[in-house]
Image (cartoon, rainbow, N blue to C red):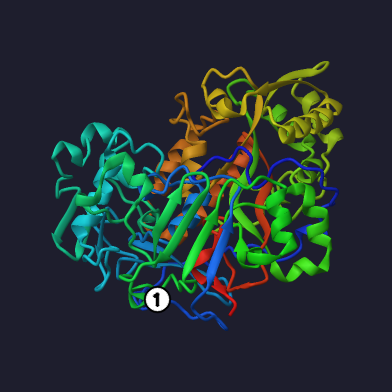
Amino acid sequence: MGTLTLSAACSSGGAADDGKKAGEGKKATVQNFGIGTKADSTGPATAVTGAKPGGTAYDLDQAGFDYLDPGQQYVSDQLSVQLLYNRSLTGYKIDPKTGKTTLVGDLATDAGTSSDGAKTWTYTLKDGVKFEDGSAITSKDVKYGIERLFADYQTQGPQYVQKWLFGPDYRKAYKGPYTGQSIPDTAIATPDDKTIVFHFKDAHADTPYAMAMPNISPVQKAKDDKVKYNNHPVSTGPYKIASYKAGKSLSFVRNPNWDPKTDSIRNAYPDKWEFQLGIAEPGLTNRLAADSGLDKFAVNLSGSSDPSKMQTLTTDAQYKARTVNEYQPYVEVMNINTKRIKDPKIRQALMYAFPMKQVQQAFGGGAQGELGTTLLSPTVAGWKKFDPFNKLTNTTGDIEKAKGLLKEAGVTGKYKISYAYANTPRWQAVSLTVKNALDKAGFDVQRKAIDPTSYYTVVGKVATPYDIYRTGWGADWPSASTVVPPTMDGRNLADGTNNYSFLNDEHVNTEIDRIQAITDITKQNDEWRTLSEYVLKTDTSQIPFIFDKYFNLYGSGLGGVTYNQVYGTVNPNTVFVKQ
């Protein structure tokens, strides 16, 4: 999440779909991510109509899981599976009928209480929450779970809470629990077994959302075997791991010490979950489409259908009743290197010339990527439509407008630019499409293929020699606080930066500091949106072109299939096996 996407929601394919019918279906519900009350946080979860407990649900997955340790989990496939066995302080409650999403207390009695101008946050654990061995979960277990995030091997998970406590170089301030030291009470206090208090350096109005990340969860000190914990994390949720063969299979059975009365988020209807890993495409999509045997009870929680199958899947009526098509939190953008292309008129010429519609077709049509004209996803709170360059009117590009801007900028002849792209079939095809359009507008595009494994490292170097290059970014929770600062702050310009356009606008930098200090989360979200619109229209440092979408089928033997728009995956909490 806050996360980058190289292949994003899909990989290359030969879909002939024009995106119209494929783009139909449910739209993003952008105003449904409010913070719930203590009553909303009280279990059990809202019952799903027609659901009965029992049976085995299956997940089919292209790859395996790099991390089962909640401390290391940060990408969508891991986020979806951890809901089965891991509980954080807060979490997302999804109404099985409407899809309305509310942030509530998960292990905690509510979403948190702030004081000291939103610098201090207090959480109280619910009665009856236990580990899989039956021992009670205490505030000290939650604190220990956070302390181990400071260990050297913990490199992949979110870092919000760590940085909020001790600053960007948080590992220098605290080395982790294996040194025998604990985080001082002045940072995290546990006055009793039920209470945990966070004292941050600055105000953070969106703390309740950060507490829903999988790494803000309890770990028993006696069961923590460091790196090996990744293979057998101890459950706090409705299921526990029965067996795990990395890259091949993962089996879950019921955790008898999970009490549904403590959980307003998870229904946990199936007796078992069986994950089949390492299934190649398009075979995986073919199996879900065929809907035979045990595959009738299968779903792919996090992966979209193979694009080569989209024409059939979006036009054949037999699949409609078991299709999920929803927004993911990612926005695809073409970054413009502002250190190299300094004239905003030239950057705007690139914006006008960019061929959105043609690129969309390489994504499998509208069902896997909707045309997007904002730097924030529609899944982010406070989002509104914004199209200052009329891209949705001129979806294939406005060549004449681009030529006029180049002329205004004093460009004579062709304007040469270097275009870096990931060397995969999909991005090879996209790069040719983009080059052809830009060349017609007066540019001379030089394409440069980059090894996909090192792509982000190369384009993230301050001295990168490239002018334009694509990246994808998704909000970690439905607030642009996880989008605007990391991708637009000009003080974040070291190698490895997430500010891939190297934008350094003093107005933007100042506004980021001002907005981060706002304690009213609704007002803050509106301000983030306004600032992102300023960057798009005035700086034009990025060209947004696709809002990624999840599209896939599930087996006819499953019911209660809902969607987690925060994660961009199917929500396993409401799934049941038809009896």
Numbered circles on residues, count: 1
> Is residue 428 among the parts visible in the rendering?
yes
Residue lying furthest bottom: 50
Helix, strand or loop under label 1: loop
In depth, the one of 56 and 419 nearer the eye is 56
Q: Which residue occupies 60% across, 77% down?
A: 578
In depth, the one of 206 and 308 nearer the eye is 308
Where on the picture, by quarter, is residue 335? top right
x then y, percent, for residue 342:
63, 23
Where on the picture, by quarter, is residue 510? top left
Q: Which residue occupies 51% across, 38% down?
A: 487
Tell me which amino acid carries mark 1. Asp
In depth, the one of 160 and 316 nearer the eye is 316
x then y, percent, for residue 253:
42, 65
Q: Is residue 350 above or below residue 74?
A: above
Where on the picture, by quarter, is residue 550? bottom right
> Is residue 459 among the parts visible in the rendering?
no
Q: Which residue is mark 1?
A: 40
On the rendered image, what quadrant is the C terminus found in? bottom right
